[in-house]
Amino acid sequence: MMDKEVFFEEKGSLGLIKLNRPKALNALTLSMVREIYPKLIEWEKSKAVKSVAIIAEGEKAFCAGGDIRALHDWGKNNDLEATGFYREEYILNQYIKRYPKPYISFVNGIVMGGGVGLSVHGSHRIAGENYSFAMPETGIGLFPDVGGTYFLSRLKYNAGVYLALTGSRIKAEDAIFLGTASHYVHSKNYKNIIDKLSQGHDVDDTIKQYASVPEKSEFEKISSLCEKFFEGNKVEEIIKNLIEEDSDLSNKFLSIINTKSPTSLKIALKSLRLGAKNNFEECMKMEFRMVSKVMNDHDFYEGVRALIIDKDNQPNWMPAKIEDVEDIFVDEFFHSLADDELNFN
């Protein structure tokens, strides 16, 4: 039983999901998606289950993202599981976003990519003392997905653009400041909250009882600068802002951005600007169009090779320069998929 990737338990009036791949930083697999989704449907229909919570085994990570190596291999072999994973994952993300019962995520440790999709869209997003959030997809030729085009595009101070283009990490106090987390609770109190929820106690009152005020956000200190630096509808404009500032901070951001896939940077920025005007479902449909194109593009496979497989950290992006990524090429990532569009039933 310990080999199971995800556990489900009904504890009184609480439906509890536990991710169980600690050695793999609880990376999300297709089989996990296929287990979680029907269980949530079952619990939605259950009169006994009043709320749902998700937690993870191990102290290092809640969920460090999707199983990128599997996606790389599927794509290389033209296996339909590649885009199929994203289709099922995005449908799960949308279901969590619209879940009619309280959905509480207990996040302590690393949370990236697919882990963000499992947690950030819930009604109650609890960050622990070791919370470490990042959306580093532009570093592997991808883009911040799992609803990132929706929630990142709505963060104040252009924080979403900053997080998307640089892949920078933020801590619990930053997440509270920006709203990606709703409560700060020390992880030692997670069990107490789960026990009370299982006994039918009010969700908001219970979390409030154990929540505390985090330290001052480090991001808050640079928020006004980020708002200025990351203003613009083109990556070239943002790079120009950083060059003109010519400070230690702007130069640091510039050096980080220069390591990312130029194509990913451009499609990520465009998706956030479009996402700010779209509802959640429209954002998810857009992301599926984008990822379907990404899985047929060079940079994703090169990024995974360089950062995950060979680990030489020397990706050969194509095109290699921002100025060589033409708008007409970027637009292709947003074209309709006709009969293959993502649909929510």
Image (cartoon, rainbow, N blue to C red):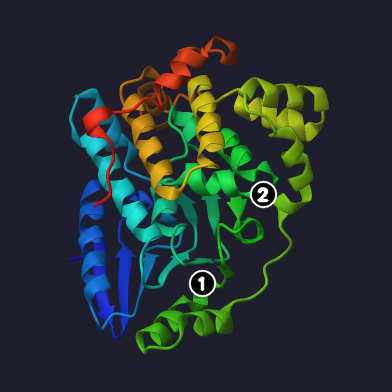
Mark 1: give few (<14), some (14-19) or many (20+) Cα within 10 Å.
Answer: some
Against 79, residue 195 (above or below) is below
Against 163, residue 320 (above or below) is above
Across and down, in percent, residue 82 comes to 24, 34
Across and down, in percent, residue 136 comes to 50, 38
Against 200, residue 219 (above or below) is above
* Drawn side of residue 211 relative to residue 50, left or right: right
Q: Quadrant of residue 174?
A: bottom right
Rendered residue at 44%/46% (across/down): 147
Quadrant of the drawing holding the N terminus: bottom left
Would residue 34 be seen by someone viewing this image from the given angle? yes
Q: Which mark is residue 156?
A: 2
Q: Which mark is residue 187?
A: 1
Q: In which quarter of the image is residue 76?
A: top left
- Disc 2 marks which amino acid? Lys
Front residue (pair 275, 293) = 275
Q: In which quarter of the image is residue 73?
A: top left
Q: Is mark 2 on a helix, strand or loop?
A: helix
In this view, the mark in front (2 or 1): 2
